[in-house]
Amino acid sequence: MTDVARRYPVWTLIVLLLAAGLLWLILTPWTPGIEQVLGRKRVFVNALFGGLTLGALYFLVASGFTLIFGLMRNVNLAHGSLYLLGGYLGYGVSNAAGEWLVAVPVVFLLVGLLGLLLQHQVFRRMEGEELRQTMVTIGLSVVLADMMLWIWGGQSYTLQTPDWLSGPATLPIVVGVDRNGAPVYMRFPQVRIAILVTAVVIGLGMWLVLNRTRLGMLVRAGVDDREMLTASGIRIQYVFLAVFGFGAGLAGVAGVVGGTFQSLAPGEDTRFLLASLVVVIVGGMGSITGAALGALIIGLVEQIGLVYAPTYSVVFTFLIMALVLAFRPQGLIGNRR
Amino acid sequence: MNWDKRTLFGLAGAVALSLGLAMPAAAQTQPPIRIGVLVALEGAFAAGGADAVRNVELALRQVNHTAGGRRIETVVAPSDTRPDTAVRQARKLIEQDRVDFIIGPLSGSEGIAIRDYAKTIPDRTIINGISGALEMTWVDPAPNVFRFNLDGAQWGTGLGRYVVQNRGWRRIATVAADYSFGYTNFLGFAVDFCRAGGTIVQRFWVPLGATDFGGVIAQLPDNVDAVYLGMGGTDAINFLNQWQQAGAGTRIIGGTIMADQTVLTARGRAKEALVGTLISGPLAEDNPDPAWQTYVRQYREAFPANQRFPSPSLFGTGYYIATQAAIAGLNAVNGDLSDGQRRFNAALSSLRLATPLGEVSLNENRQATGTVFVNEIAEGPGGTLVSRNVAKVDGVNQTLGLTAAQFRAMGLPSRTNPDCRALGGG
């Protein structure tokens, strides 16, 4: 952290000032002047939190995608199908078990296993042939999409929120004053808070594993220089398997989460594949921190855009991607290779 | 030339055969009539489109594929709800398949494109399938385009007056999809609602295909009696799901496609938010009218249960009525399609058609006047949702009860139209 601050003092200052300004906006009651520019505080804070949650979901999908790419140079275009499959399986499991929480580990295992199978049976056979791998993943995504349409049909599914998470929670943030002068506190769906917390916990866990464990060391070394790592006697195939399985499992869990606060239907697979591509391009291919930053930016832009400029909200995401590609093609946090 | 015996026999046989076949055709004196069925069989409305094809077949079977003394043949041309595909397929029907007239299209923006195409083929007739775009028969209509179904604005009528007068819901906020059908369907509701004295506090327009509505839900004002939701398909499901998670709050008034089969058959709890919702549209599943009941029974008998919906869909009913109109028109002119189909067109214009949805007649724009049903969504057996009819409005015309001048002055459906205050609301 201090390293970064020393290297880019101006940028650090700008980011800190922005964060402080945002915090001030969230915590203080708004004056009529601010309301004139940004509308009611409740709306702004809600859009902000909504964006954070959406970013959390995008992060869950994109982090596996970026890990797999970073380590194996494999653009897994079937990642969206793993997301959708996870959602459908989660629907089945949570209905059978009657408990939403059960779905998360079960889906992680099932989709993770499928990931292991794909890596072991398919991608290992075409290592280093990037074009072939990409074509095969496209093919797999088409096959998986049709099989899911066959099994689950064209209607849309929504996972049932657990009872203890349904309905809104009241947050200790004052968003306005009612007619009697009493403060009005912000209400926000509990599910979304849970999703946000889950994503932060998973993100921190990944960071710890990558930076504090032997496996993480191997993965980082593999991302930096695969050949050197192999040459030093590491069985890189096992590392590949672990990463692919973990990334796939994470996509499955994201499907469960996405199916809970949005819905699952044919077509969601490509939507989330596109979202994770955009996130990873903005954040920087192969970097977990980059995926987190990219997901945060895209989520916030989508939500705030929907509130303040609904007509153009679709464009903003791609505008940001285009800007990043134009001025920082390696992504915001990416290494130039 | 080297004629051997076998060839000669073959030739003789062929001549005899063709003579034999020609005899009954000569007795009928006229060649069959070819009808092109332009219908969306790909894309979002594919299931509804398939139901439309079934219903054309049903209507023709009921008259033994004969009308005006001539046999009827059909050619199906699939589109994908995109206007350019619809026009390409219509052109194929006219130029390659040489059909006499077209029944179709299915979706809103297709209808507008087909209206413009119709002007290039003045000697052929087009009977709309179930396209609901107001513009198709309102803005510079084509003289050879006929619509026997109500348009999107008409489908919204009746609901507004009902919620004000019967439920006392006077202050509402609205959230609707930001495209042509969203505006049109909303306009029909709003004209009625405002004229009955209702107030629209705030209007939100959300892009088609948006998935996260948290920001919009947070903006909905607290002090309203109900919220109007004009969305369909997965957009509707996502909205309802997030609406529940945010603590729901108020009552819902729905646009016509808010409670279509996509939403009602969805798995999960989202649709439960719809219980008690009031919607309006051209049909009511529990309509006691014998004409409707007979039609539903015939539909169920004609196709096995796994090859149809439990009851005819909105799309299917539209195509059924369009085919009925074509048959009635052909009968009225004895199958005479000569003189650029002028007599056929005149017959269609003056039809008073008895349909499963009641009697339908056309106005000077060749647009139907008919009945709109107000339905309430209720819980049915086994956790399903059903819609129950609570009111109906007969004789809803194209200008929604306003004079043509008033309606024209209001402007075309858009984000800001209609102006509630100008109509007597707030």
Image (cartoon, coloured by chain):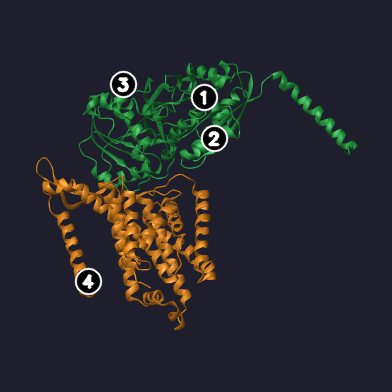
Q: Nearer the viewer, residue A93 or A20?
A: A20
Marks 3, 1: nearer the viewer: 3
User: As drawn, is A286 to the left or to the right of B323?
Assistant: left
User: As drawn, is B64 to the left or to the right of A328?
Assistant: right
Q: Against A87, is B277 above or below? A: above
Q: Which residue carries the number 2 mark?
A: B91
- Colour chain B is painted in: green
Q: CA distance from mark 1 to mark 2?
A: 32 Å
Q: Position of residue B101 (x, y in %)?
A: 55, 27
Q: Position of residue A246 (x, y in %)?
A: 42, 66
Label 4 neighbour load within 10 Å: few <14, some 14-19, many 20+: few
Marks 1, 4: nearer the viewer: 4
Question: Is residue A102 in sight in this rendering?
Answer: no
Q: Which residue carries the number 4 mark?
A: A8
Q: Quadrant of the C terminus of chain B?
A: top left
Question: Is residue A305 in sight in this rendering?
Answer: yes
Q: Earlier in the sequence, mark 2 or mark 3?
A: 2
Q: Which residue carries the number 1 mark?
A: B295
Kind of residue at badge 1: Tyr
Kind of residue at badge 3: Ala
Marks 2, 4: nearer the viewer: 2
Label 2 marks a residue whose chain is: B
Label 1 marks a residue whose chain is: B
Label 3 marks a residue whose chain is: B
